[in-house]
Structure formats: C-alpha cells, structure tokens
Image (tube, rainbow, N blue to C red):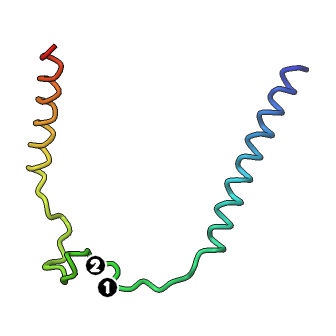
Amino acid sequence: MVQKIQYLTIIIYIIIAALITFLLFFLSYVMNKKTKLNYSKLLSYESGCLPTSDNNSGVLIHFYIIGIIFLILDIEIILLFP
C-alpha cells in the first residue's frame, strides 16, 4: 500500500511537470510575434558591407584539426610540467 502511494505521488509530479512544460510552450507559441522573414536579416554581417559570397563555411576543417591537436599537446605539456 505504501509503495502504491509513493508511485502515485511520483506520477502526479511527472504529470504536473509535463503540464507546466506544455503550458509554457503553448504560451510562448501564442505570444510569439508572427514576423515575415527578411532576406537581408538572414545574411551574415560583415562590417556593414554586403557579404562577398553565400558560402558560410569560411574556415576549413584542416584548421580546426590543427587547433584541436595544439590543445591536446598543450594539455599534455601542462600535465607533464609539475
């Protein structure tokens, strides 16, 4: 009997949490301003100038890999120093 009451309270808490979550999602959906998407707002900002290309991948993956390797070796040196 005691276990059923404990499970019942847990289920009630889960239901209340789900209701609060759905209520907040619903309120944010209702209160959201319906704005039209503007193409000029979707462009990347380059110091007030128009972007030079539509390609948003400005940095190659090669530079990320070199950065990660540098961080790993830097951490190794820090751990070996003491």
Q: Position of residue 21 (x, y in %)?
A: 67, 54
Question: Which residue matches tag 1?
Answer: 40
Numbered tag placed on residue 66 in the rendering = none
Q: In the picture, which quadrant includes the N terminus? A: top right
Relative to 13, does residue 40 appear above or below in the rendering? below
Label 1–label 2 contact, CB within 8 A: yes
| Residue most extreme to the top | 82
Relative to 77, does residue 71 appear above or below in the rendering? below
Quarter occupied by residue 51: bottom left
Q: In the picture, which quadrant includes the C terminus? A: top left
Q: Residue at x 9, y 43 (%)?
A: 66
Q: CA distance from mark 1 to mark 2?
A: 5 Å
Question: Which residue matches tag 2?
Answer: 43
Position of 43 compared to 22: left or right?
A: left
Near mark 2 (Cα within 10 A), the count class, few <14, some 14-19 or many ≥20, is few
Relative to 78, does residue 36 appear above or below in the rendering? below
Q: Residue at x 17, y 27 (%)?
A: 75
Q: Nearer the viewer, residue 54 or 74?
A: 74
Q: Amino acid at mark 1?
A: Ser
